[in-house]
Image (spheres, rainbow, N blue to C red):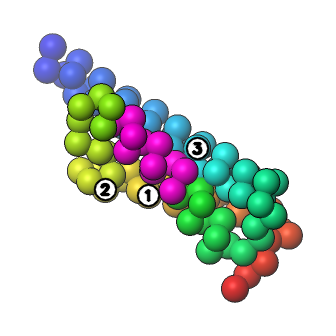
């Protein structure tokens, strides 16, 4: 049973990271379509706050310590999602 718990924790961590990256991309997409943001810093900030903020709210409602405070990979997933999104677009301006 101990190995099952480790497997469950690992699967949850990676699936949560994929979801966080996806929500970051959704935040960036909304910043572009709704607000017309084109600057990479504004897009990153909006996407990061959307993804990480949603995860923090989920953890608080679940009565857990937010993952961003205990899992180093958690915030990196947001950055990875943003970099993948930014790499697929060429019309965004650089600072």
56 to 12, vertically: above or below: below
Q: Which mark is residue 76?
A: 1
Mark nearer the N terminus (3 vs 1)? 3
- Give the labeled residue for mark 3: 23
19 to 31, vertically: above or below: above
**Going 31% across and 45% down the picture, which residue do you hit?**
67
**Going 14% across and 20% down the picture, which residue do you hit?**
2
Name the quarter where the C terminus is drawn.
bottom right
- In screen coordinates, is 82 left or right of 75? right
- Between the residue at mark 2 and the residue at mark 1, the CA separation in whole angstroms equals 7 Å
Task: Please state the extent of the stretch shown in magenta in the rendering.
Answer: 49-59
Q: Which of 89 and 35 is in front in this view?
A: 35
**Going 66% across and 65% down the picture, which residue do you hit?**
43
Q: Nearer the viewer, residue 49 or 68?
A: 49
Label 3 sits on a secondary structure element that is: helix
Name the quarter where the N terminus is drawn.
top left
- Magenta segment includes 51: yes
- Between the residue at mark 2 and the residue at mark 3, the CA separation in whole angstroms equals 18 Å
Q: Where is residue 74 shown, x and y percent of the image?
A: 38, 50
Q: Where is residue 23 shown, x and y percent of the image?
A: 58, 44
Q: Which mark is residue 72?
A: 2
Q: Residue furthest bottom?
A: 95
Q: Which of 13 and 4 is in front in this view?
A: 13
């Amino acid at each position: 049973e101990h190995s099952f718990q480790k497997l469950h924790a690992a699967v949850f961590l990676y699936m949560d990271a994929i979801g966080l990256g996806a929500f970051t991309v959704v935040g960036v997409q909304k910043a572009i379509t709704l607000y017309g943001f084109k600057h990479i810093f504004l897009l990153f900030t909006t996407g990061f706050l959307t993804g990480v903020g949603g995860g923090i709210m989920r953890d608080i409602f679940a009565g857990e310590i937010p993952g961003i405070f205990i899992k180093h990979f958690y915030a990196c997933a947001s950055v990875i999602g943003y970099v993948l999104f930014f790499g697929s677009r060429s019309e965004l301006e650089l600072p």
